[in-house]
């Protein structure tokens, strides 16, 4: 019997393609071409599964145009590239890649926090530009990290991992705000105290954003929220672009209403607001918080395992809308 066909939408590790090739006829994009929506739809014809990354928008138009598609497996924990309601309505399973990137992403949150608060990239640019002539007592003096107050907005797995690093490694007082409060034993394990969003903004010396993007979290940090923060504070975003109003942030950084920021994600990325690019007190990285080879391999293998588990055995590993499996629309797609 012919193997089922799947599409891998972006370049990925050869090991992952080899694994998928054991079970499927795989069409891949190792040249990492940029596809328009029409090209994506054309390539999805006849495919029962798609290995996607956060770059591909999977919406009602794509799903309606690809009647054989049963599953989209994202190689990312975030899944705001999926219109999950449309997927559920149209009978397509979505899966993501949680857990395997938690520690690596939390490490990077701290890298950005330290780099921004202690002015690492700003001072490095100064040195490389040949401007360093002699030592001075206040040269590139930054903010204290150890012993300060770490605020975390969004206390899922990554938020908790950031909290543990702050509390245990840097002796920080950790406060957090989340849609729901954590159980007392988890709070104790993270060394974190639940506060209102306003108290979080007002008390944090360093605020790390780790919440998922949704309509509700769009511009969760805007003009009003920035105005509540300490002028000496650092803001770190390792979550998603759009959670921060980038223009409002640039304005606050430019006018000294906020000391520094470390940003891995941007509104409209890979385009970055020119107002941010013009600033020295912001560290900018190209969405690499989970980028170590072992972690990216684990994320890709988990996406592959979702495709294999679901298409061969009906058992996805990390489904997002498992209820879809019982639907008439899904049954129709299976034919
Ligand atoms: C994720 O997994 O959501 C990361 O942002 C990588 O895309």
Image (spheres, rainbow, N blue to C red):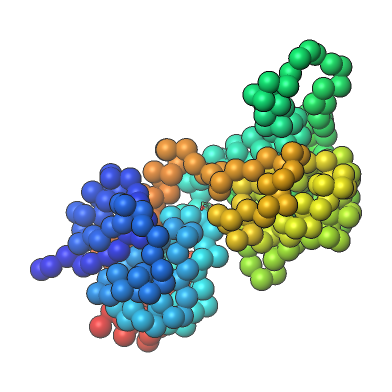
Q: Position of residue 296 (x, y in %)?
A: 43, 44
Residue at image location 45% in from the left, 64% down from the top? 56
- Determine whether, in the image, residue 245 is placed left or right of residue 197: left
> Does 168 appear above or below 273?
above
Can you see residue 155?
A: no
- Determine whether, in the image, residue 29 is placed left or right of residue 247: left
**In-front residue for pair 223/107:** 223
- The answer to which image quadrant residue 224 occupies is bottom right
Q: Position of residue 255 (x, y in %)?
A: 87, 47
> Does 180 appear above or below 16?
below
Residue at image location 82% in from the left, 47% down from the top? 254
Residue at image location 73% in from the left, 52% down from the top? 275
Q: Position of residue 129 (x, y in %)?
A: 67, 25
Residue at image location 73% in from the left, 63% down from the top? 219
- The answer to which image quadrant residue 41 occupies is bottom left
Rendered-image quadrant of the N terminus: bottom left
Can you see residue 30?
A: yes
**In-front residue for pair 197/82:** 82
Rendered-image quadrant of the C terminus: bottom left
**How many marks do you count on the picture?**
0
- Determine whether, in the image, residue 188 is placed left or right of residue 329: right
Residue placed furthest toward the top: 134
Q: Position of residue 136 (x, y in %)?
A: 84, 16
Residue placed furthest toward the front: 130
**In-front residue for pair 137/200:** 137
């Amino acid at each position: 019997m012919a193997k089922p066909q799947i599409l891998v939408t972006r370049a990925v590790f050869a090991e992952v393609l080899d694994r998928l090739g054991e079970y499927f006829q795989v069409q891949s994009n190792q040249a990492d071409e940029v596809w328009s929506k029409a090209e994506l739809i054309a390539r999805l014809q006849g495919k029962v599964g798609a290995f996607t990354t956060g770059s591909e928008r999977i919406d009602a138009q794509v799903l309606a145009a690809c009647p054989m598609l049963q599953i989209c497996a994202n190689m990312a924990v975030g899944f705001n590239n999926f219109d999950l309601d449309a997927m559920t309505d149209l009978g397509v399973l979505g899966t993501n890649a949680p857990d395997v990137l938690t520690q690596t992403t939390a490490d990077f949150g701290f890298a950005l926090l330290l780099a921004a608060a202690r002015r690492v990239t700003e001072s490095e640019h100064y040195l490389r530009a040949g401007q360093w002539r002699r030592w001075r007592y206040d040269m590139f003096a930054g903010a204290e990290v150890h012993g300060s107050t770490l605020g975390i907005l969004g206390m899922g797995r990554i938020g908790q991992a950031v909290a543990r690093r702050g509390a245990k490694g840097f002796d920080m007082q950790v406060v957090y705000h989340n849609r729901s409060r954590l159980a007392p034993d988890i709070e104790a394990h993270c060394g974190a105290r639940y506060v209102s969003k306003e108290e979080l903004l007002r008390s944090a010396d360093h605020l790390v954003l780790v919440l998922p993007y949704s309509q509700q979290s769009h511009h969760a940090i805007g003009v009003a929220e920035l105005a509540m923060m300490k002028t000496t504070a650092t803001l770190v975003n390792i979550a998603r672009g759009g959670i921060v109003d980038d223009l409002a942030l640039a304005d606050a950084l430019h006018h000294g209403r906020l000391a520094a920021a470390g940003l891995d994600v941007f509104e409209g990325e890979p385009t970055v607001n020119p107002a941010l690019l013009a600033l020295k007190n912001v560290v900018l990285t190209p969405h690499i918080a989970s980028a170590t080879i072992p972690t990216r391999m684990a994320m890709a293998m988990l996406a592959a395992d979702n495709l294999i588990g679901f298409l061969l055995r009906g058992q996805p590993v990390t489904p997002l809308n498992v209820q879809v499996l019982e639907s008439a629309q899904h049954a129709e797609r299976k034919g």
